[in-house]
Image (cartoon, helix red, strand yellow):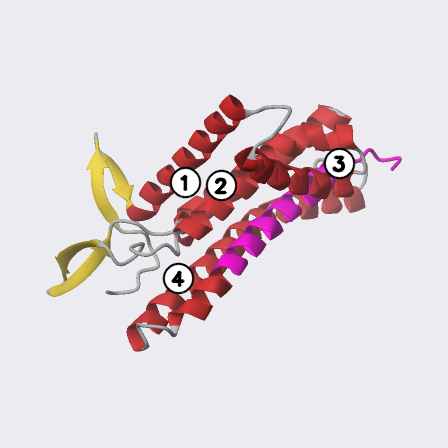
Amino acid sequence: MEISIAAEKIGEIYGLDITNSMLTSIIASLILIIIAIIFRLIMNLKPGKIQNAIEIVFDFLINQIENVFGSFNEAKKYFPLLATIFLFIIVNNWLGILPGIGTIGIYETIHGKEILVPYFRSGNADLNTTIALALITIICVQIFGMLAIGVSKYLGKFFNFKNPIYFSIGILEIISEFSRIISFSFRLFGNVFAGEVLLIIIAKLMPYFAPLPFYILEIFVGFIQALVFTMLAMVFIRMATLKEEH
């Protein structure tokens, strides 16, 4: 198998290319939708084991958000977006280390060389996915900021013509917003892709018991990366929604 930075095309639907990372992301989305439907159907005042497990995750997330925003009511406003980001990233990360991901596929001849093209690949090991997540997050940050302090006041942060100093600060703020997209996307992509490469190399060199500790490590890393991305999103939203007097 050849290590490829770009996700590999495995088919197309009506002219739309379907890549292996896209397929894994679709599966991750379906898993979350199914869990949400099950949770809604079994929700009860006397929770069972499944409901307890889901509520533990939700309690953890709402507590983290409340710690950043300092108010439960404020935390509830941003919980749907932040919880979705966290769950999508962590499910995608953990799907990427399941047996068969990256090893089951079809052989294709590329440049005269027969190469295995896997059917599945971690969605976050594709830069397109992480850029999309970063764009959605930063766009939502701007929307939340405008809703919280007003459109004109929020945009005044970026476009201030009172004097050259304020104007320069505004330009730096715009550059800062774009740099967040780059840092967001490349941080997540780099960590997940590096873990994927590590597992492939270890599995090739020592295919039996040696990879097990690295799989355990990747489970932990997958959780940390999802948490870091979500925590940074929380901080950016908090910064955007703070009024000047605060």
Residue 69 position in % (x across, y down): 77, 38
Q: Are marks 1 and 4 in contact (CB under 8 Å)?
A: no
Q: Earlier in the sequence, mark 2 or mark 3?
A: 2
Which numbered marker is on residue 28? 1
Q: Give the Cα distance between marks 2 and 4.
A: 18 Å
Q: Is residue 62 left or right of residue 185?
A: right
Q: Are marks 1 and 2 in contact (CB under 8 Å)?
A: yes
| Above-or-below relation of 191 to 83 | below
> Which residue carries the number 4 mark?
196
Q: Amino acid at mark 4?
A: Glu
Circle 4 sits in a helix, a strand or a loop, which is it? helix
Q: Earlier in the sequence, mark 1 or mark 4?
A: 1
Q: Are marks 2 and 3 in contact (CB under 8 Å)?
A: no
User: Of discs 1 and 4, which sits in the foreground?
Assistant: 1
Q: Which residues are magenta?
A: 219-246
Q: Give the Cα distance between marks 1 and 2.
A: 7 Å
Rendered residue at 50%/47% (across/down): 90
Task: State the quadrant of the C terminus.
Answer: top right
Q: Is residue 29 left or right of residue 220?
A: left
> Which residue carries the number 3 mark?
160
